[in-house]
Amino acid sequence: MNIRGKVIVLEGVDGAGKTTQLEYLRSYLSLPEQRERFGETVFVHEPGGNEVGEKLREIILTYTMDAKTEILLFFASRNELLQKVVLPLLNEGKNVIYDRFELSTFAYQVYGRQREDLRDFVLSLSQEIVPEHFVDYVFFLDLDVEIAKERDQLRDAKSTRFDLEGVDFFNRVREGYKRELLRYPHAIIDASRTRGEIRDELIQGVKRVLEG
Ligand code: TYD
């Protein structure tokens, strides 16, 4: 398959500010001069993305389940989005920005849940499902977990069972991200600064990737 568009992933613990920053990016990249320069960029969100993905999302975010079942469902949703939505877009030359991708599974299901024994399981699913060198760049919004938790609680969005996890869980998630990030071209963005500062750094970074 001939992938022509670029794939960028935004990651971070719940409350790091991904949603706000994605809104800024969306507005910026939809400006006529930016569209002319970079072509069309489509934003997708994991888990979810099409009807099957949304049903899987509902199950994943509602029920407590066996660790392997949870991982398989995240990858089921990932595969569905990839095959049905993302690969066709990339083949048309469009760029795709993911709100979470497989790094979330490493960070949450392996490190957050203290199931390092399942890392190879996740890695093998990744190798089966995700094309080689699929991700062009990952931006990780890094923020102290206590602050992220406070911010997350101020959001209007409905809490999922993941939001209810404690500070220790999210500290493990954060450290897990940092460990696994090294396998991808990436930048760590200090998300303790103002929204505007984070936005400027992210936009500059995204433009560099889209130009490359
Ligand atoms: P969501 O409401 O979409 O949160 P956010 O806006 O922060 O992405 O809920 C998704 C939750 O699922 C979030 O807490 C992270 C978690 N998650 C995993 O545990 N593993 C994964 O592979 C993915 C994609 C998400």
Image: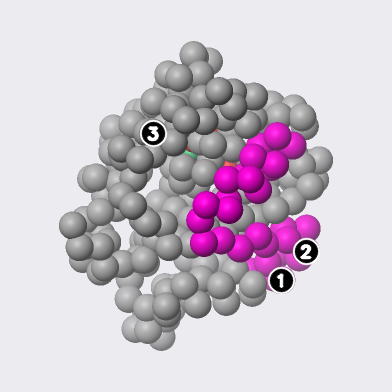
Q: Which residue is mark 2?
A: 193
Q: Which residues are magenta?
A: 170-199
- Whole-percent x, y for residue 79 in the image: 31, 39
Please report whichever mark, 3 or 2, sits nearer to the chain's N-terminal start.
Answer: 3
The answer as to whether callout 1 falls within 8 Å of ligand 1 is no
Q: Position of residue 24 (x, y in %)?
A: 56, 66
- Label 2 sits on a secondary structure element that is loop
Between marks 1 and 3, how big is the CA–CA gap? 38 Å
* Image mark count: 3
Residue drawn 53% across and 40% down?
A: 104
Q: Amino acid at mark 2?
A: Arg
Q: Nearer the viewer, residue 137 or 206?
A: 137
Q: Are marks 2 and 1 in contact (CB under 8 Å)?
A: yes
The residue indicated by pointer 1 is 197
CA distance separating discs 3 and 2: 37 Å
Q: Which residue is mark 3?
A: 124
- Magenta stretch holds residue 187: yes
Residue 158 in sight here: no
Q: CA distance from mark 2 to mark 1?
A: 6 Å
- Secondary structure state at the residue bearing disc 1: helix
The answer to whether residue 12 is visible is: yes
Looking at the image, tell me whether mark 1 or mark 3 is earlier in sequence order.
Answer: 3
Q: Which tag is nearer the camera, tag 1 or tag 3?
A: 3
- On the rendered structure, is 112 left or right of 192? left
Q: Amino acid at mark 1?
A: Glu
Q: Is residue 5 above or below residue 109?
A: below
